Amino acid sequence: MKKILIALETGEKEQAAFRRAAEAAGVACAFTFTTPAAATEEQIAEACFIVGNVPPRKIAASENLDVLQLFSAGADPYMPEGVLSEKTVLCNATGAYGQAVSEHAFALTLMLVKKLHLYRSSQLNCRWEDHGMVTSLDGATVLVVGLGDIGLSYARLVKAMGARVIGVKRRGGPCPEGVDELVLTGEIDRVLPRADVVMSVLPSTADTAYFYTAERFGAMKRSAVFINCGRGNAVSHEALLQALRSGEIAAAAIDVCETEPLPADSPLWREEKLVITPHVAGNFHLASIYEGIIGIALENLTNYLGGKPLRNIVDPATGYKR
């Protein structure tokens, strides 16, 4: 009897779907349905397949765990030594967040280039004032740093508005649809000065920590806008604040922060040229995210029980999907 732990909010419909997957595979399974916070160490230790971001400390390199299927795209909390055993295959939810996060980033982009953040500030202070010239995505150069599902979805959105898209990724290859030019991560300094918009969806790895340095902000156009919907530690709060205050960039928007929740005394809250959203681009705020996660989890459970290759396996050396 295989013990399957579903640590994710589910209803009768989803629970029945998981049970049908086991029945179709002809494998006897005992299911436990709970939430990540409520999952006990005993439940986690007994499970051979887990769906959900259970607390890493509770896994304790369980030798029973064959597969951990996350409901997040980021896998960094599960990468340190001692969290997962060598036998455990880690899978993420890449593919479930593309629409939601790319649309959020796109909305933030339009907000900044049309100076809507400044007009919102004027409204809240009861001021009828004109903030001057704005820019357009039509003819703009947009740098998309991180060309996974989210980055490619965003690239297609700005491309439809007439932008020229430069994509930045770790490995080379042909230009994907929606991208005009492809460069490697190590070449970013060559293309940063050309960008009118820099949108980052970098994951959290040793190579991406504090990727956006003061020097890189200084290399951007003074009219450029910066959006971060990847991981908060890709840019230090100090470097971003300095770039905005000095006018090295025109404006910025962040959905992720170096420290979350962002402390109430952080000067970022009071920076007029910065838009902050509290890590809500993804999560479960769009129905398609939950549906996509359930679909990925069901597919991987079916493949696991049937001895077939799994989807979205995370490379333990890089933290990226293979």
Image: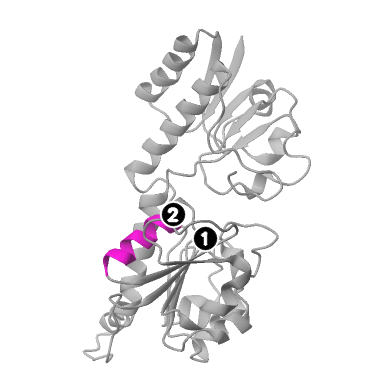
Residue topped by disc 1: 146
Q: Position of residue 239 (x, y in %)?
A: 60, 80
Q: Is residue 44 above or below residue 202?
A: above
Q: Position of residue 316 (x, y in %)?
A: 69, 44
Residue at x-position 64% and y-position 23%: 43
Q: Amino acid at mark 1?
A: Gly
Q: Position of residue 76 (x, y in %)?
A: 64, 50
Q: Amino acid at mark 2?
A: Ile
Magenta span dominant secondary structure? helix
Residue at x-position 41% and y-position 31%: 295
Residue at x-position 46% and y-position 61%: 278
Q: Are marks 1 and 2 in contact (CB under 8 Å)?
A: yes
Residue at x-position 34% and y-position 59%: 156
In screen coordinates, is 230 left or right of 142? Answer: right
- Residue 280 visible? The answer is no
In screen coordinates, is 258 left or right of 59? Answer: left
Residue topped by disc 2: 150
